[in-house]
Image (cartoon, helix red, strand yellow):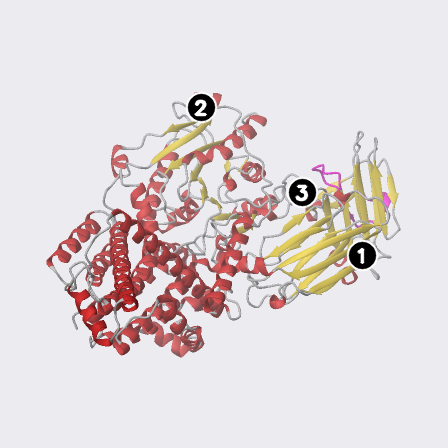
Amino acid sequence: MSAVLNGVLLLLVVLGVLDVFFVYETNRCSMTYMFEYPEYQKIQLPKKVSSRYPSYELHLYGEGVYTEENRNLSLTGIPVLFLPGNAGSYKQVRSLGSIALRKAESIGYKYHFDVFSINFNEELVALYGGSLLKQTKFVHISIKAILRLYKNQEFPPQSVILLGHSMGGLIARALFTLKNFKPQLIKLIITQATPHLMPVLPIDHYLTDFYFLVNNYWNLNANQLQNITVLSIAGGFRDYQVRSGLTVLPSLKIKNSALSVVSTAIPRTWASTDHLSIVWCKELILATSRALFDLIDGDTRQITEDSNKRMAILRHHFVRHPAKLYESLDESIINVSETPRWFLIKTRDWDLKVTKEYSETFFAFPLHDKRKTYNQFHCRSTFLYTHSWIFGCSDTDSSKCVEMEDLSWRSELLPTAKAVTLQLEDFLNASYFVLYLPETNNSKFSVECEFLNEELKTTQLPVTHAFSFGLSSSEAMINSSGLLHILSLQGFSKIYQAFNILIERNCTQSKDMKSTIYRLYVPWSHEDIIRVPSDDLPLKLSAKLHVPQPQNDSRMVKLTMYTCKDCYYKVTVCTSFVQMLGQIIRCHWPSLHVYIVSNLLLAFGAQLYAISNKGYSLEFDSSLDVAAKPYKVDPVINICQFILSYDYFRDTWHSLLLPHLDSSELHSMNLLFPLGSLFLFLLGTGIAYWAGILFKSTIGILSSTLNYLKRRTDFPKEIQPFTNKMLVKALLLSLVAWRTCGAFAILLLFSHYLLKVAKLQANLWRLSSSENLATSQISATITTEASSAKKLEKHILSLQKEESAPPVYSYDLHTASDNIKMHFSVINLLFWLTLLTLPCCTYWFKNIRDNIQLAPDPLRDLAIILIFTIEILMNSSVSSIKSSKLLKITARLQLPFSILVVAFGQLHLYRVPYFITFSLFLHSLSCFI
């Protein structure tokens, strides 16, 4: 029964993982191509800098004529510095560099950007935080070196624009924490898929300490950093490496100078990007390039010093594009010198289709008779020219509207149309809304307008419960009599929720599908999803959140439908259980490792308790079934979390210098869900169970291979836990840990132990087969020769005296089997510990050419302690520890360890190896005490 239950739990994990990695929208980004061969000119830095940072380089991107003209580095443009991220290449800058160069050519080089890039040697800084500070210092040196290249310019730049991908964006913000850094060197930071909130994988304390340093500095110095504009761009659900919720800038104090958006909500992009395509997605790079050119001050030919204007321009290109070129909002009043054609539209709704030449025309919509019945005016046009198109007029006579207020800034660009919704109460002094159509030449487009009542066009639609498993649904029927309908999705606010929204449409007349647009609007986060149906088939929309609803925020997620007249719509919302699992895995997959280890520690404690009380070991699956119960862990953590919600206990906790509870931090970020810890614990149980079965099978395969390669070996005799040979091996591995990398030494230790256990398993199989052979020989003799009990006894004694016959192995077989069970539990814990150290080992191995010793090494001290502990346990046996006075205490301490690893390890995975090591260390002491 336990195998079936654990199999179901493992299946849930697999479904969630499949949803994260394979269930997302298709790649709708266009590739960026270079028009000329890209070149990366290396900038010579002082020898002192090159010797201190031999692996880092600074490059200038160029193509064709630009490269030739700037060989001598007589630069006259605006400097932009690209910072690659984890394992990123400096050549990833070519997409932005090439498009910026083409844009400069199109305006005759009136303005242009000099795009630099840093080569960080593709370091894996997301896996090891020890080099983050070094990279930050090199960026500071590079910025000063870049600005020195412009010292002879008429208007030399005083700052550099920073563009950071992935961890490069964190490096950009970390610059301000340096003691000698001048904040005025940076005015604008643009980050792409950067996990600002916390590390994706917090596997070493250098990484978490660096995050704390950066985020704490920006929180405490928010007032001094108000002049720094920061834009964070996330990739959406296609980016499974860095979930978009981590890219939100953490400080609320800098919200006026910081902006976080998801690429699916960016105008003229409207596409999700993966972690790499975000640097070359043509639609996104074009939006970035347009924003950069709009940020230029025409007087200084550099980026504008006005931080409010910088933020307005970024919002123009990345949040709400009004289908107009950016202009100053001061020019909102226009004068109409000639009015060739004026039409007065008195009806509630109106539409116009243009299929041929059309002369310049104004359409005036009177407001005085509409205010009592309607509170909104909505207009939509498929003529996507970039000039003003809708105005407000305060004159009582529409034919005398010679001065009008430009309201086009309130409109919004959509994939196939531009739309505007105006609140009548905001224009109490206006008498008319005026729609302007310029002279056209054979352009085909349509314009539709209507007055509407917002309450009548808004429908409340409760979403289905999370535990409905898609068996129930909520439906809404919309008998469209207008252009705009809004569905408020009640109860959709949690990060773990996921729904399938099916939209069916039935029209009485043939309508162009492009005039229908669906938008999932999240009011507290710029993560909207916009879809345009391409055929008459029902459209399926996946509704999930990147950022949960903040506390004290009552706004609801809305489905805005830009509909067609004379059409009927049916909207069905049902829970997607598989996508819910995907959301849980996406947000909590690092925590699964913690819950797996918690289960293993409980099972390990049960096994040690059985050895102490009964004198024999339990099978791994049996000990897991007996001990791995969520009620042993979850209630304790919930009680602690409840107690710490009171100020007195929280202050006492902090006065004892105890770390924060990770579950409390997760709760503050609204990432926990009802029974979440219980569910994650059960998932950890399922993974631990089947991973143990797989691991045991792997050891069996390795043992069979050893049996085949080395057929005859004697079963090892009982040896002492501490020997000279063991001491030599421990010292050699400790030397490896000290002189190279602690994680590498742990990997060697695990490999050595794995081979040791495989040999023990092979010997156990040979021992068992020998006993079976002896038993069969005795049984055969009983059948053919033994006629009395006395003859049987004599025959058994004679068989035992023969040299060729194996002895009776009953005691040795049980002892060897117990030892194997105990060793398997130890190496299982060591396996999950080794997995957590592999990223650090990978970083060291990739950079071994530069330095054979990893410095600083977060695992060196831990590795040395673990080496001596495991070497002792390798030579231990059940018989040597079952009478230990410390064994029962060690067994009982596994429960507190399993609680502590959950309490303090979910957001700090680097703590997990310490709990495992301490547990094994106490076990090794049981061999002596």
Return the x and y of residue 398 as percentages of the image width and height. Answer: 85, 46
Q: Amino acid at mark 3?
A: Glu
Depth order, front residue of 927/908: 927
Q: Please report the bounds of the magenta region as a residue range.
A: 382-401
How far apart are labels 2 and 1 at the CA level?
Answer: 57 Å
Q: Do callouts 2 and 1 mark residues in contact (Cβ within 8 Å)?
A: no
Please tell me whether mark 3 sits on a helix, a strand or a loop. Answer: loop
Q: Earlier in the sequence, mark 2 or mark 3?
A: 2
> Which residue is under mark 3?
331
Label annotation for residue 728: none
For discs 2 and 3, the disc positioned in front in the rendered view: 2
Q: Quick check: 425 left or right of 861?
A: right
Q: Earlier in the sequence, mark 1 or mark 3?
A: 3
> Which residue is under mark 1?
452
Q: Amino acid at mark 1?
A: Leu
Q: Residue at x 72, y 36 (%)?
A: 385
Q: Residue at x 70, y 46 (%)?
A: 532
For discs 1 and 3, the disc positioned in front in the rendered view: 1
Q: Residue at x 86, y 49 (%)?
A: 508
Q: Quick check: 426 left or right of 356?
A: left
Label annotation for residue 67: 2
Let me know if residue 454 appears in the view: no
Return the x and y of residue 627 as percentages of the image width and height. Answer: 38, 73
Depth order, front residue of 855/445: 855
How far apart are labels 2 and 3 at the CA level?
Answer: 39 Å
Q: Earlier in the sequence, mark 2 or mark 1?
A: 2
Q: Is residue 398 magenta?
A: yes
Crowdedness of circle 2 by 10 Å Cα count: few (<14), some, many (20+)? Answer: some
Q: Residue at x 24, y 74 (%)?
A: 887
How far apart are labels 1 and 3 at the CA level?
Answer: 29 Å
